[in-house]
Image (cartoon, grey):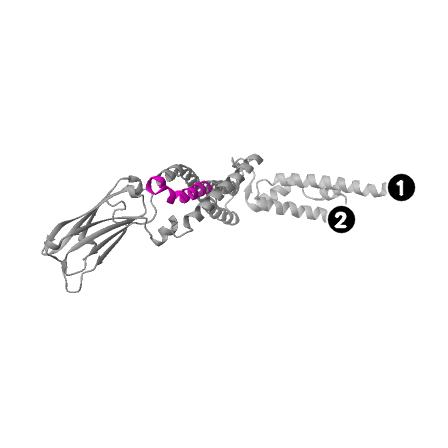
Amino acid sequence: MEKQTNNNQAPSKLEARFKRKKDKWLKNLRCSLSLLEPEDCNDIVNSYNEKISVELAEGSVIEDILESMESIETIRNNVYAEFGIDPQKKVVNKSEKSIGKSFTAWILNIFVVFFGIGLPMILALTFFIAAIATIVAIVPFIVFMFINYDFIKVLPVVIAGIGILPLMTILSWYIMIGLYKLGTNGTNGFLFLAGSDKRVKSKVKKINVFSRVVLIITVIVFSAAATSGTIATFVGQNSFGNSLIHQRYFYETGATLNVEDKNLTHEKEFNYFDFKLVGFPHGNGFNFVINDTRQEGDNSVKEVTATFKHFWRQENIGDLNIELIESETGTPKFRIELDYFSWTILVASFGEPTLEVNIS
């Protein structure tokens, strides 16, 4: 029994010794071919590996197999000569094969530089700026909303904004990190194609368990605020969002000018150029509606009524005035001026106000 055990162990020890010598020889061969492209080097080393394995399987001894082969130096010289590589100068001669590979590498480098490095880094910078800008915008957003609109009406919008803006910041931050990593990988790919051993390490630190838990709780809280605020903003006929969508204005202010004694006539319909608008918060970009209610054949203008409808706080809007500024050959031109008391409605407003003019 002991003799049989020794016979079983002997072949395994012999195989282990053969494998160590084979691996050592192949490692030396790989090191000697360091000037080759990795794929070419792998092909050659694998070829010799298969050749040695076949002869070992046929019962040959590893020493005899290695002795029968050419020396590693001879193999290296022959391979370098085939690939047009001068081992002394460590450059590749411009053979047709190497020129083709260089051109392919050049094309790949262009794509890697633009799509793998440039584009991800530019987008990463964009999302980084977006994340910072979102943080900066939170406080002014809240302040302006409460200045411009009635507190109770705009409160759901502010709650939704308090939830949405931080979520946008977190999302922008992680998109920026992902793009930065993509750009880093693209840089390493470019260095690899260029034949450089240098690599760029990503400096993004992994968050620990505590930070991960805090992040999850933060996302849940702000998501709840964003969801509840958004629902309250749009649900209900008198809600802020619903009123904006259907243009159900909260307030309006008006003025009337009687011109019956001026004997004004205007045969054609009035248009925008018949009115000079002064002091309106949105310049001339809001809704402007003209209704001419005169009867057919009646060209005289008796009364002009202007009504300004809006969503802002009533205290922010002052008086609306109309005056006749021109009346040549019976064609009238009017000036409509609005006073307002808060410049913040110029930079933070939702919805479009409407100026409605009625001619009778």
Magenta-colored span: 145-168
Q: Identify the residue under disc 2.
A: 57
Earlier along the polypeptide chain: callout 1 or callout 2? Answer: 1
Position of residue 331 in the picture relative to residue 196 (left or right): left
In magenta segment, residue 157? yes
Position of residue 223 in the picture relative to residue 261 (left or right): right
Disc 2 marks a residue whose amino acid type is Ala
Q: Identify the residue under disc 1.
A: 3
Marks 1 & 2, CB-CB < 8 Å contact: no
**Residue appearing at x 34%, y 47% in the figure:** 350
Give the image location of residue 40, x and y in percent: 59, 46
**In this orientation, which residue lies closer to the viewer: 24 or 314?**
314
Give the CA distance from mark 1 to mark 2: 25 Å
Q: Nearer the viewer, mark 1 or mark 2?
A: 1
Q: Quadrant of the C terminus?
A: bottom left
Give the image location of residue 321, x and y in percent: 19, 46
Classify mark 1: helix, strand or loop.
helix
